[in-house]
Image (spheres, rainbow, N blue to C red):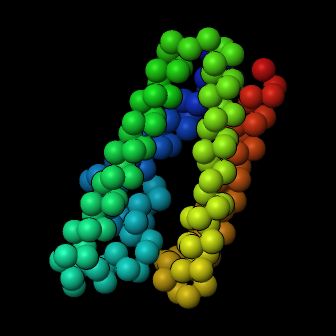
């Protein structure tokens, strides 16, 4: 097994844990589920809004499922060169977090709408580390 395959499989397993939480324990604060947002519990007071939020959560979980299944196909059937290119694509896709999501979660964190406090910083560092690992694995091999 190559370093690229190990990196992709590790990412698939991590994302799979997030998908399972989003589908079956959306309100959890573990595995990057949406329980970290104080608005999750508040939305339950308004069934129409809560159903809309649940719809978006399940949409994200479904999109992630498509994404990881494609990564599994890449691991099984792709050439080493395609696997390397997929890591570059994974890097670019993951970097999009800093365009819209990070400013939004950081702002919510600063307003006290995220529990635990400063979770946005931890998430930002974690995403940065993913990007670094993806790039290192793509370059090393």
Residue toward you, 30 or 74: 74
**Residue 69 location, quadrant:** top left
> Looking at the image, which residue is at 34% across and 45% down?
62
Q: Residue furthest right?
A: 140
23 shown above or below 6: below
Q: Is residue 29 left or right of residue 101?
A: left
Q: Quadrant of the N terminus?
A: top right
Q: Residue furthest bottom?
A: 111
Residue 76 x/y as whole percent? 50, 15
Q: Quadrant of the C terminus?
A: top right
> Looking at the image, which residue is at 52% across and 21% down?
74
> Looking at the image, which residue is at 69% across and 34% down?
88
106 shown above or below 9: below
Q: Residue furthest left?
A: 47
The mark total stands at: 0
Q: Is residue 113 left or right of residue 40?
A: right
């Amino acid at each position: 097994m190559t370093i690229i395959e190990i990196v992709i499989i590790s990412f698939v397993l991590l994302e799979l844990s997030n998908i399972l939480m989003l589908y079956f324990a959306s309100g959890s604060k573990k595995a990057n589920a949406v329980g970290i947002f104080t608005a999750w519990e508040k939305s339950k007071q308004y069934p129409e809004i809560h159903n809309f939020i649940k719809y978006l959560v399940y949409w994200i979980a479904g999109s992630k499922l498509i994404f990881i299944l494609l990564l599994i196909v890449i691991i099984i059937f792709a050439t080493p060169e395609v696997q390397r290119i997929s890591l570059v694509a994974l890097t670019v896709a993951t970097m999009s977090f800093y365009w819209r999501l990070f400013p939004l979660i950081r702002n919510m964190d600063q307003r006290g709408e995220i529990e635990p406090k400063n979770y946005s910083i931890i998430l930002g560092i974690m995403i940065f580390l993913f990007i670094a690992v993806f790039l290192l694995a793509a370059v090393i091999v």
